[in-house]
Image (spheres, coloured by chain):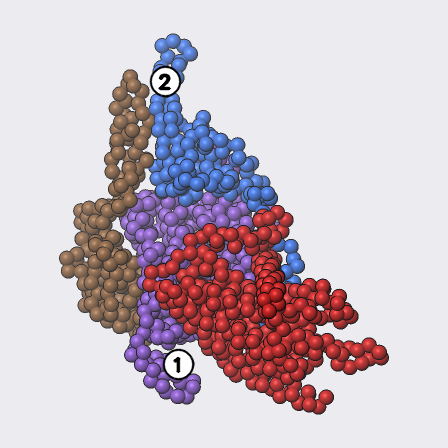
Chain colours: A brown, B red, C blue, D purple
Amino acid sequence: MTDSPSENTPEGFAADFAAEIGAERWTADNDTVHVYVTRDKWVAAATAARDEAGLGFFSFLSAVDWAKEVAVGEPADDVDNLVERYEVLCRLSSATEASAIILATSLDKDDAWLDSLTSVYAGAAWHERETAEMFGIEFRGHPNLIHLYLPDSFEGHPLRKSFALGAREVKPWPGTVDVEELPSTTNVEAAALSGDDTAQSAPEGEGS
Amino acid sequence: MIAFAVPFALWLTAKLLVALGLMLGVVLVVIWMELKWSAHIQSRVGPWYVGGRWGWAHPLAEALKFLQKEDLVPDDADDKVFRLAPYVMLAGTIATFVVIPIGPSVVARDLDIGIFYLLAVSSLSTLGVLMAGWSSGNKYSLIGGIRAGAQLIAYELPLVLALVAVAVQAGTLSLTGIVAAQATPLFHIGSTGISLPFVLSGQIIGFVVFIIASLAELNRTPFDLPMAESELTMGYVTEYSGLRFSMFFLGEYAGMVSMAAVVSTVYLGGYWLPGLSNDLLDWLGPFVLVGKIFFIVFLFIWFRWTWPRIREDQLQQLAWKWLIPLTLFNIVATATLKVVF
Amino acid sequence: MPIPGIGLAKGLWLTLKALFRKPVTVMWPDEKEELAPRARGVIALSTDNCTSCMLCARECPDWCIYIEAHKVEIPTDKPGGRVRTRNELDRFDIDYGLCMYCGICVEVCPFDALYWSPAHEYGEYKIADLLHDKEKLVEWLGTVPEPPALEK
Amino acid sequence: MTQLDGRGIVEVSDGGVSVELKGETMTLNIGPQHPSTHGVLRLVAEVDGERIAKLEPAIGYMHRGKEKLAEVRTYAQITALINRIDWVSGFANEVAFIRAVEQLMGVEPAPRAQMIRLILTELTRISNHLVFASSYPLELGAFTPLMWAFREREHIMDVIESATGGRFHPNFNRVGGVKPAAGGGKTQKKVSLDLPAGFYAAVENAMDRAELACDELDDLVTGNEMIQMRAKGVGIISYDDVIAYGISGPNARASGVPTDLRKLETGLLPYEGIDFDVITRENGDAFDRYLVRILEIRESIKIVRQAIGSVPDGPLQAKVPRVLKVPPGSIYVRAENPKGEMGYYIVSQGGRIPYRVKIRSASFSNISILSKVAVGQLIPDLVATMGSLDFVLGDVDR
């Protein structure tokens, strides 16, 4: 499909492109186009995006860690039928027009590797190094897959949902404190109040 | 014999002390001037609180600050060379004051090969810089030192050739002779003899080249590559602190004053002003010379706070492809003019 | 092609003119700039408005507000009336060493207890002194300016 | 142009003589504490004499983990976090994030707030470019432009402070518009944070001062032959490298890529009613990157002057629930940050806190090309190239 997409709305563009590279499915809500591809078509899809669809500009590459129980922040929406996976996203856009797609693929957690895009996009090198060290995904074919941000001695992958935030373990949350009861009455409702309404999942602190 | 020796030795030390005192005083004033003028150029105020009005005691305060700072020697520094470097550089700069005439009869030592001595001594500071760069045991200082070495050698040549043209025109090498040559009337209008300093009588090219070369000699912008703040942090001075750093700092400003003194003596007529008799000049001479020094120093400061610095290969090309041919042409022109008139 | 040295000369002329212009520095301890009324310099607390509802402490992203309060009975005028209680502030500290001046606490306070004031001269030698206690915060109330008139 | 193959053999081509100077290279650490690395960037350079054989940037000294922090903060708290990524252009960072949340929630921002956002973004762009245009000559050795440009920039800072309360981090954006009132209580809610009296006059004066700063910079720096000697033909980035490495903003436009998100992303801020043109230069060297930013200051001045005249009346913020819950969904919105394309990929799972926020910052990709451009350059050229890329380490390391 070399000509410009039939009607250049995001949906039209996504439909043609997904059909052309044989993607699993595509969505275009909030006019952000996601094209889901299986792992083996990853490099082929990227090359097709660059050559046929004219999306030469490498915007970013990152991942989302979908996990059932979450050490940080609020859990996902419908937790029970959530498939545990790493979703790698790579946004490719055109430098001069507004057309762009987010290429996405899902990797299950214990076999998280992917082919590197550095052969297709020179700019992918740093993005892949960052995603590798933050999520623990291995990018095969990457020239030097070493730590980008974190010191070499750093273990663990910070952006995984299972990685707790150190700062919040050390310092008790000042928000758990509540108004101290009158010495005479033991107010059940006040005690309950200080117990449950944690806007953030901070550890339970006893009201001092 | 001894009777003669003692007063001579005393007289010589007295003269040296006076010269040193004058030079140090002028250097402190020049430091203050650079702080004040650069501030006003950048719409800042500059030294203000130190020493009451106008912050006149700012340079003194800085000197005291450096004195009480600990001057440490890095471990992998080449110890003796590291400690000696600032003094070699300072010696090279201060020694030039011996020859500069402050008044008709007031000069520390009137050598008849004045200019030759001047150049020999001023290239001594190149040695000091290289010693500092090498011995600091720090990669940035090494790069700074080598840059300084290449730059100072490349700009020694135009300096020498410019002074050769002056010697040709003045017919003598001694500085007092040169000032006297500038004082003799060149031509007469009616009864009064008009005499012009060398810069107006044919040495304008030499003057411009000399100013550019002395800027490079002093490592000042646009040639401050050895101490390029944004590339080599502080170049060959990075590892120095305390008293040794203040020696380098003093050396830089003393160098500025000495170069300004040489320029004003050789091109602007030194202590001489038209219309002043000789004995009057004995007293007013130093002030005239210092006035001219301040003008030249203003030029240096003005250039520093306006222009960026150039890369060292451009700097070398400027020296070899432009300044040296210019000075050679200048010598030939002066010689032919000398013969014709 | 412009004359080769013209750029350099124009630069010199500009700096020479600048040399004789008046510098713009405000000599801080002696002369003071007048502050923008909406400037966020320090947070002032009015203890009588504060009902220690803990909203500001919970909403603060830097966790830098520490509050302690206890309930106090209000004496009823007619005998046998319902005993009503009021919250009495014991401690209300803001740690300006952590605060990033985002203003979420002032915005979220439902009882107008926190105000912005442009005062900014409260530097300390020890970082622990940046923890302003209740009295200090009430002191800052004096420096809260009138809100500026609006563009018509 | 001299070029250099891996084994440290220098081919001195301009001299016409091919001399095999076999010398080992010296590893030189430029940074992380170095005057010209704009923060804590460390360049591990293999240096042969002063010519760079190989260069590997080591980043991460400024990594604050913004994306992890965003996963434990509500949307209001994230706006305070986000304008500290590229701290030189504080306000401009928030625009893309706030617009993304508004589109996720389907909230139409108040038109008056949109125009105020546009004015403040352009003021931030001018102040960011003024910081660049005056600190770049400082890298090359000229001290004075810095002071003059900062003196004029103070007027812009005062205007932003008078309207929003903060200079660098105004924190003035709210979902659905701009901060409507000083506080939540009864009396503070009546204190409207609309534009203060004399705001338009102050902006007009600030724009004249900015124009004065541009003229002074033109005379002192752009026309200066030495700056041209140091910056022309140095650090050339080709058209395809710009696209392959994802370089955006003025750095891309200086290499001829006409990408300006203010024209492409029309939904973001009301740029349609304002006519301004996209500045591009062809040869993509350090001098062109400098020139593009100076001309962009003049464009932004034109934009602000037109924008002041057309600020619609109306409320400052659209109707938004007090406790913000964003419906589930994921969206990517990008804006023209003064340094390049600044985008946020937000995955929301319907709570007060986003599930994941990916921050696409401009300088991260902009300096990933350093190791390619720096090979064969002298150290002063490397400093000139790095300075011209106008990056800030907060933007690189997030």
Q: Nearer the viewer, residue D22 or C138?
A: D22
Kind of element beneath mark 2: strand
Q: Is residue D12 above or below residue D281?
A: below
Using residue D384 as the reference point, say whether residue A158 is left or right of it: left
Residue hosting label 2: C73
Crowding at mark 1 (Cα within 10 Å: few <14, some 14-19, many 20+): few
Kind of element beneath mark 1: loop
Q: Residue furthest left?
A: A110
Crowding at mark 2 (Cα within 10 Å: few <14, some 14-19, many 20+): few
Q: Are marks 1 and 2 in contact (CB under 8 Å)?
A: no
Q: Nearer the viewer, residue B27 or D127?
A: B27
Q: Residue furthest right?
A: B190
Report x, y in % for residue C135.
45, 29
Residue type at numbered disc 2: Glu
Instruction: Tell me the quadrant of the picture where the N terminus of chain D can be found.
Output: bottom left
Report x, y in % for residue B107.
64, 69
Q: Is residue C42 visible?
A: yes
Residue hosting label 1: D2
Figure disc tally:
2
Instruction: Tell me the quadrant of the picture where the C terminus of chain D can be found.
Output: bottom left
Report x, y in % for residue D126.
51, 59
Residue at mark 2: chain: C
The part of the image, by quadrant, that contains residue B303 is: bottom right
Q: For the point 51% across and 43% down, which residue is it? A: C39
Q: For the point 56% across and 45% down, which residue is it? A: C28
Using residue B103 as the reference point, say whether residue B327 is left or right of it: left
Q: For the point 46% across and 51% down, which residue is it? A: B68
Residue at mark 1: chain: D
Report x, y in % for residue A160.
23, 52
Q: Is residue D117 visible?
A: no
Residue type at numbered disc 1: Thr
